[in-house]
Amino acid sequence: MPASGSSGASGSSAIVSVAIGQWAVATAPAKIRTLLGSCVGVILHDRVARLGGLAHIVLPDSRGETDHPGKFADTAIPAMIGEIERKFQVKANGRLVAKLVGGASMFTTSGNANPVLNIGLMNQEAVERILGELRIPIMARDLGGANGRHLTLDTTSGIVAVRIPGGADYEL
Amino acid sequence: MESILSKAQCRLLWMIFERGAESASQALSKWLGQEVRLTISEVELVELTVAAEVLGPPETLVAACAMSLSGPLSGQILLVFEDRSGLALVDLLMHQPVGTTASWGELEQSAAQETTNIVGCTYLNALAAHLPGKISRDSPASDELVPTPPTFLREFAGSLLEFALMEQALELDQVLLIHTSFASSSQELNLNWSLLFIPDRASLHALAAALTELETH
C-alpha cells in the first residue's frame, strides 16, 4: 500500500481524499480532505507557494516500524514534508505553518483510564513536539470533543473548513 | 505482521456469531411484529482503510446506538441505521405508515435504544452460550457478558468506525469486525441497518487463543 494518499496533480482542481493512516500533498487550486474520529489531522500549508499537505495520524510513535509510515506522527510528518519538497521543488524551511484537528473521544469506559483517550493526548503531544523541533508554527488547534470532524484544506488559501454532524460548519 | 486470526478461525467465528444472529432475528421479529432476518455478512480481518468504509461512504451521516461490552468478551456493539431506514423502525413500532417519522426526536431515539437493547442482549446471550470453552474458563466464574445501556449518536459513518476500531488499531494493522446485515420480507421496508460487533484487543487475543485450542481438539 502506498504510504501517501493520492497526491493529486499540481494545479488540478481535484479534491484529494486522505484515508486513515495516510497523507497527501497538493498545490492550488486542489483541495485535500479527510474524516477524523479519534485520530489527529496534521495540516501543513505554504502560503507563498500555495501548496499544502494533510496527514491522518493514528499513533504517536512508530518505534522503528517502517511498513506504515503514514500511521505514526514521527514518520508521517517528516515524510509529508519530504514529499512536498521533492514533488514541488520547494524548501519547506520557514514557509510551512500547521493546523491540528481531531483527537475526539466518543466511547468512554468505566474504571481504568481509557487508552484511546490517552492516545489522543499522546498524539497531540507528539505532533506538537515534532512540529516544534521542525520549527513549524501551529496556527490553529481544534482538538478533543466527542464528535467526528470532516475537514477540507483549501491549498490556495490555507483555510481549513470543518464540518461536524448536527452542528454549524466553521473554518480554521 | 502475522494475522491474529487465520481464515479458518474467522470461519469458526462466523458459525458462532450466526447463532447470535438467529436468536436476534427471532427477538427483533417479535419486537417489530414483522419478520426480520439478521445474517452475518462479514467476519474478517481487514486493513483499517477498508474497515473505515464498511458502512459505505465514510462521510454519510448515520444514526447509531452504541453499547460497550465487558466480561469474557469486551468491546463495542453498534446498531447503525442509514437515517431514513432508521426512522422506518419508529414507524413500525408506532404502527404507522413507513415514511411518517421525519426526524430523530426523544421518542424516536428511545425507540432505537430499546431496539438495540433487545437485539444486542439477545445476540450476546446466544454468543455467550456458544463461546469457545477456554474464554469462559479463563474468566472469573462470576463474569458474564455485560452491556452498558445504549447511547444514541448521529455521526459520520467513517468517524464512528474510527472511534470504535481505535482500540484495536493501537496494536494491530488489521482489525476484526463482525458485520451483520438485516433483511425483511416486506417490500416497503428497506432495512439499511448494520449490527457491528467490534472486540477490543484483549478479547481479540482471547478469541484467537480459544479458537486455536478448539482447532487442536
Image: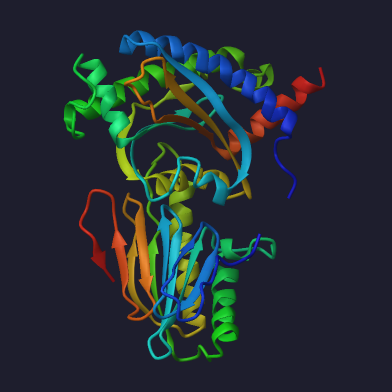
Please identify the quarter of the rendering in which residue A81 is found.
bottom right
Q: Is residue A163 left or right of residue B75?
A: left
In the rendered image, the residue lying farthest to the right is: B216
Q: Position of residue B124 (x, y in %)?
A: 49, 19
Please identify the quarter of the rendering in which residue B64 is found.
top left
Vertical order, B141 against A93 (above or below): above
Residue at the image point whose x is 66% and y is 59% from the top: A1
Residue at the image point whose x is 35% and y is 56% from the top: A149
In the rendered image, the residue lying farthest to the front is: B187
Task: Report the number of discs.
Answer: 0
Is any part of residue B140 visible from this angle?
no
Q: Position of residue B100 (x, y in %)?
A: 17, 26
Vertical order, A105 against A110 (above or below): below
Is any part of residue A10 visible from this angle?
yes
Residue at the image point whose x is 28% and y is 71% from the top: A172
Front residue (pair A87, A132): A87
Residue at the image point whose x is 45% and y is 15% from the top: B24
Front residue (pair B184, B211): B184
Q: Position of residue B146 (x, y in %)?
A: 45, 22
- The quarter of the rendered structure image containing the C terminus of chain B is top right
